[in-house]
Image: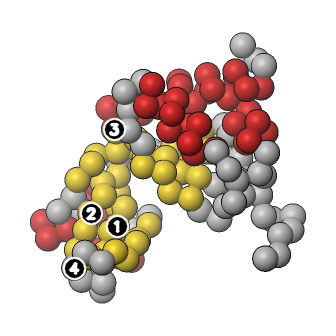
Amino acid sequence: MTTGPHSGETDLDRLLAGMTPVLAAGVYVFCTTPRTDHPARARALMTLHEDEGLTLILPEAEAGDPALRPVFRCRRITLTVHSALEAVGFIARIATRLAAQGMGVNPVAGYFHDHLFVPEDRADDAMAALRALADEVAGRT
């Protein structure tokens, strides 16, 4: 495998200290449909083919078709540090911190950043927990 200047950070402490969470505007939902060609696919933030059907993460306003069966009203937090896809322990530490707050998280890895989908009504709590974790690791507290 080739790695290079765009392969991202792997050092756990640097990832945690530099993760700078950013809360995106709007509410998202997770949806599913058996149709891999559903028109909502073009508007999805993410799609994943599973054996049971196509999973889509959509802005809530785009999930009006009842056939999509939207669930989990959530907010998206982007961790702006460029994390390597092979980084070890980054999401585990974050999920552990959020679990300690009684909060589930659905992480999605992009090429450059990790994105966290947290319950819509707990977004501010998640942001505070993530900032506190980054500050602790960076020695800013």
Q: Which residue is mark 2?
A: 31
Q: Is residue 131 visible?
A: yes
Q: Which residue is mark 1?
A: 56
Q: Which residue is mark 4?
A: 34
Q: Up-down: is 116 above or below 35?
A: above
Q: With 118 as the anchor, is 38 left or right in this view?
A: left
How far apart are the two marked residues, 3 and 1, measured between alpha carbons?
Answer: 17 Å
Neighbours of disc 1 within 10 Å: few (<14), some (14-19), many (20+): many
Marked residue nearer the N-terminal end (2 or 3): 2
Residue 5 in percent (x, y) is at 87, 64
Residue 31 in percent (x, y) is at 26, 63
How far apart are the two marked residues, 2 and 3, measured between alpha carbons?
Answer: 16 Å
For label 2, the SS is: strand
Residue 126 in percent (x, y) is at 47, 31
Q: Are marks 1 and 2 in contact (CB under 8 Å)?
A: yes
Neighbours of disc 4 within 10 Å: few (<14), some (14-19), many (20+): some
For label 1, the SS is: strand
**Given the image, on which type of amino acid does mark 4 rest?**
Pro
How far apart are the two marked residues, 3 and 4, measured between alpha carbons?
Answer: 26 Å
